[in-house]
Amino acid sequence: MSCEFLSPSEAVARWIAPGATVGVGGMHMTAAPMSLVREIVRQRIRIGRLVTSPSASLQADLLIGTGLVEELISPYVGFEHLGLAPAFRRAVEGGSLAVLECDEGSLTHALYAGAGGLPFIPCPPGIDLTDIPKVNPTLYRQVQDPFTLEARWAVAAVRPVVTLVHCAEADESGNVAFGGFPFTDRLMALAGRRVIVQVERMVSQERMAAHPPGTTLPGFLISAIVVAPGGCHPTAAPGYYGRDEDAIQAYLEAARTPEGFQEYVERTILRLDEPAYLEQVRGQQPAGVS
């Protein structure tokens, strides 16, 4: 199936079915596919299982706070030096969110298994020294090494039904480039059965071909591309704009209470479609670099 160029609302409506396992990329407060996340919130699409990168922030907290996530696989949801993730913490303490505890290494290995078509993958030594496998039997099981006959912990493959990631560029054939370090986003995309990519801009096929191996994805793996300059806001898009800490701090202040969180969502997301949101913030960001 060929890649389609769609608007955020079209891509989300077409490719994210209610109750699906959804992978959302972005590391810390960088390269989060916020245009797609906001559109999920507008369309009120429930997510059966949300899978994040080894370190997530607003992309997860928004979806959790709106009550759209039933189960979470994530080693960390927070805002680094700016503080904890208020909606995530509230949901966990209130019992409305099931969390499948895991560590960063295990999640990365689970995505490798998903990308490679493996049912599970053995974990490196060390996870046995923690209580993580005990509290998460859904992902962790003990297996016997067929070569040494020793008992080893293994983690089940993680394969999202649809993965959402941000990339810097796309060409007319649907090939995309991360434009820097892909973190675990490229791996998550390879593990996903479907992939939706939001990009900052379109470029020529010649420019796309110049990117080094391991920093691109071919168009035949991608279901939809959304061209959304500024779409990571308020997180950063490397090479284009930094994170908007004022906007993130405004979110954290509002999200301290359920009422404040709801008012924030109404004001910044539900009352604006995505083109209007991007138009509102685009003047605050520097132009893209060539």
Image (cartoon, rainbow, N blue to C red):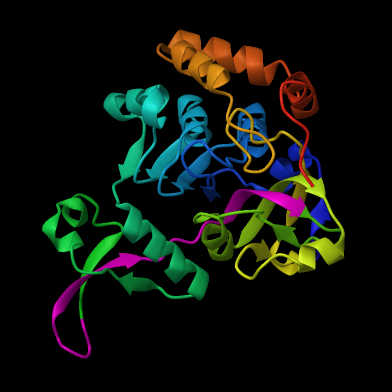
Relative to 119, is 101 above or below? above
The residue at the far front in this view is 290
Q: Nearer the viewer, residue 284 or 117?
A: 284
Q: Is residue 285 above or below residue 260?
A: below
Taking depth in this image into account, of 254 and 137 the one nearest to the observer is 254
Q: Would residue 216 be found to the left or right of residue 257 on screen? A: right
Give yes or no for residue 2 being in the magenta stretch: no
Residue at horizontal 35%, vertical 65%? Answer: 156
Residue 9 in view here: yes
Residue 266: x and y, percent? 62, 14
Q: Is residue 1 visible?
A: no
Residue 192 position in % (x across, y down): 57, 60
**Residue 34 versus residue 17 in the image, above or below:** above
Question: Residue visible at 56% across and 55% down?
Answer: 181
* Residue at 23% over, 66% down: 141
On the image, the x and y values in percent for residue 28 come to 46, 39
Can residue 152 be found in the magenta stretch?
A: yes
* Chain part drawn in magenta: 145-169
Which of the two residues, 193 or 250, is positioned nearer the viewer here? 250
Instruction: Give above or below for 100 relative to 146.
Output: above
